[in-house]
Image: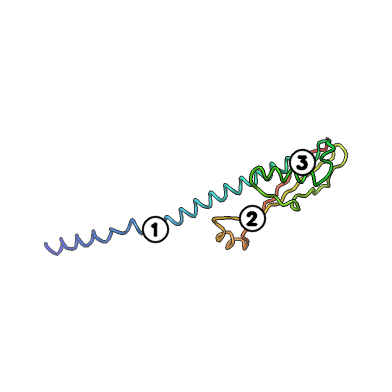
Amino acid sequence: MRASCRFHRSFGRGDSGQALVEFALVVPILLLLLLGIVEFARAWNIYEVLTDAAREGARTAVVDDPDYQEESAVKNVVFNAGATAGITIDLNKITFPLGFGGPRGETTTVRIEYEHELKWVTLLWKVATGDEVVTMTTEFSMRNE
């Protein structure tokens, strides 16, 4: 009877660290998942800001206003729209693929390319793609008025 009592006591002692080990294995995965969600949300927000800046630029380009008849003036509008949201858009990455200006009824398109540097999941992204940045491209088109 004593032997079975000893066996029962030693059997129960082995489970004392199980929860801690499981916690130590699961927490890094959950933390990485959380950081990935936050990083994706930030990238989505930046993409929305870029799309809005392209829309602002296209709208400015198609309105018949003598102050905005130059590409550089429209690029400054796009730059300022991004800067308002805390994003610095390179002026050389703002292009007009269908040309700038033109007669009424023609379409003007503003394209923006932006390189977003990942902050928290850089290592995983670099392993997956070989690059540390995500290149975002957005464009917006409007008819000339």
Q: For this view, does 38 lie left or right of residue 130?
A: left
Q: Is mark 3 on a helix, strand or loop?
A: helix
Count residues near mark 3 (Cα–Cα under 10 Å), then give few for <14, some for 14-19, many for 20+. many
State the residue position of label 3: 58
Counting residues from the N terminus, which is met first, the one under dot 1 or under dot 2? 1
State the residue position of label 1: 24
Q: In the picture, residue 106 is in which quadrant?
A: top right
Residue furthest to the right? 103
Q: Kindly identify the amino acid type of the residue bearing the numbered disc 3.
A: Ala
Count residues near mark 2 (Cα–Cα under 10 Å), then give few for <14, some for 14-19, many for 20+. some
Q: Is residue 43 above or below residue 18?
A: above
Q: Residue 55 carries which label?
A: none
Q: Residue at x 34, y 57 (%)?
A: 20
Of the 4 image quadrants, the one containing the C terminus is: top right
Q: In the picture, residue 53 is in which quadrant?
A: top right
Asked if labels 2 and 1 touch by Cβ distance under 8 angstroms, the answer is: no
Q: Residue 100: where, in percent of width, then height? A: 83, 45
Counting residues from the N terminus, which is met first, the one under dot 1 or under dot 3? 1
Q: CA–CA distance between discs 1 and 2?
A: 31 Å
Q: Kindly identify the amino acid type of the residue bearing the numbered disc 2.
A: Val
Asked if labels 3 and 1 touch by Cβ distance under 8 angstroms, the answer is: no
Q: Is residue 131 above or below residue 94?
A: below
State the residue position of label 2: 134
Q: Kindly identify the amino acid type of the residue bearing the numbered disc 1.
A: Ala
**Depth check, front residue: 109 or 69:** 69
Q: For this view, does 124 lie left or right of residue 143?
A: left
Q: Residue 19: where, in percent of width, then height? A: 33, 56
Q: Which residue is drawn at 28% across and 58% down?
A: 16
